[in-house]
Image (cartoon, grey):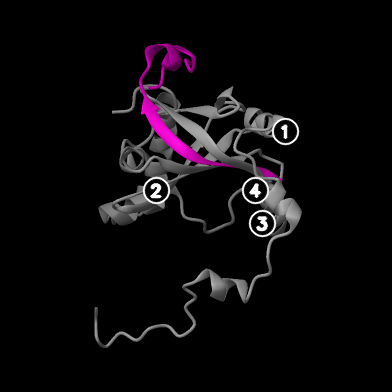
Amino acid sequence: MDTNQKSNPFSLTTMEQLREIYKAPSGRTIDKEYDYITPPGRKMIEKSSLIMLATSGPNGADCSPKGDGPGFVYVLDEKTVAIPDRPGNNRLDGMQNVVENPQVGVLFLVPGSNITYRINGRAEITNDPELLQQFEYKGNIPRTVMLVHVEQAFSHCPKAFVRSNVWKEGAKGAPEGTPTHGDFAKFVEGATDDDFVEKFNEAYKEREKKELYGDHK
């Protein structure tokens, strides 16, 4: 440790310190937690087209978006959901974490709804041919499927979505000046061409058409 580094006197490191600031959760907040998927929870999953998958491993934590048509995550039973791995960037950050530490968190979102559904549990990655086949789309079959065995499941309050007004704002499109995929690529590659960003974004749109479900190499 750097001897010149001073500790932050305002850092809160214990639950006792936190509870001095935050009151205890209400009974309903505690009572809504189950160790299985409830009927309303199942409906949320069936309507969800976007999830956030949180994992952690030896190299730290990761949170990755996963999306497809509504109901792309299958509820196999009240204790198990199956998430297909559609083509991505092949970094495998989340999968690597699951191999090392199976504990995951999944947040299910439904566009237009301020309610979310949360699942925490133990994950495993499988390439069972019969299960993969269930996620076939236009001849494309995922390479793997992640099974999440539910340990906690509950709905989450809408306050964050109300405050951010995310769906209404999202309908307007990205705010002017928001970085694009091309902007990030330009920085990474150190490109100096004035038209790099525009050309990259146009090319990427064409790539997306081929790689959304097809083989990504």
Work out whether residue 55 or residue 140 is closer to the camera in this orientation and state it.
55
Residue that carries the numbered disc 2 in the rendered image: 182
Name the amino acid type tagged 2.
Answer: Gly
Whichever of callouts 4 and 1 sits on the residue coming sooner in the sequence is 1
Asked which secondary structure carries label 4, the reply is helix
The image quadrant where one finds the N terminus is: bottom left
Q: Are marks 4 and 1 in contact (CB under 8 Å)?
A: no
| Disc 3 to disc 2, C-alpha distance | 29 Å
Work out whether residue 5 or residue 154 is closer to the camera in this orientation and state it.
154
Mark 4, mark 2: which one is toward the viewer? Answer: 4
Mark 3, mark 2: which one is toward the viewer? Answer: 3
Residue that carries the numbered disc 3 in the rendered image: 160
In the rendered structure, find residue 40 and report the number of the disc placed on it: 1
Q: Where in the figure is residue 178, as x and y percent of width and height?
A: 51, 56
| Disc 2 to disc 1, C-alpha distance | 40 Å
Mark 4, mark 1: which one is toward the viewer? Answer: 1
Q: Give the answer, above or below, for where 74 lies relative to 67.
A: above
Whichever of callouts 3 and 2 sits on the residue coming sooner in the sequence is 3
90 sits to left or right of 209: left
Residue 119: in magenta span: yes
Mark 4, mark 3: which one is toward the viewer? Answer: 3
Work out whether residue 65 or residue 172 is closer to the camera in this orientation and state it.
65
Residue that carries the numbered disc 4 in the rendered image: 170
Task: Classify mark 1: residues with Cα within 10 Å, few (<14), some (14-19) or many (20+).
Answer: few
Residue 139: in magenta span: yes
Quarter of image, res 130: top left
113 sits to left or right of 121: right
Q: Are marks 4 and 3 in contact (CB under 8 Å)?
A: no
Range shown magenta: 114-142
Name the amino acid type tagged 1.
Answer: Pro
Asked which secondary structure carries label 1, the reply is helix
Name the amino acid type tagged 3.
Answer: Ala
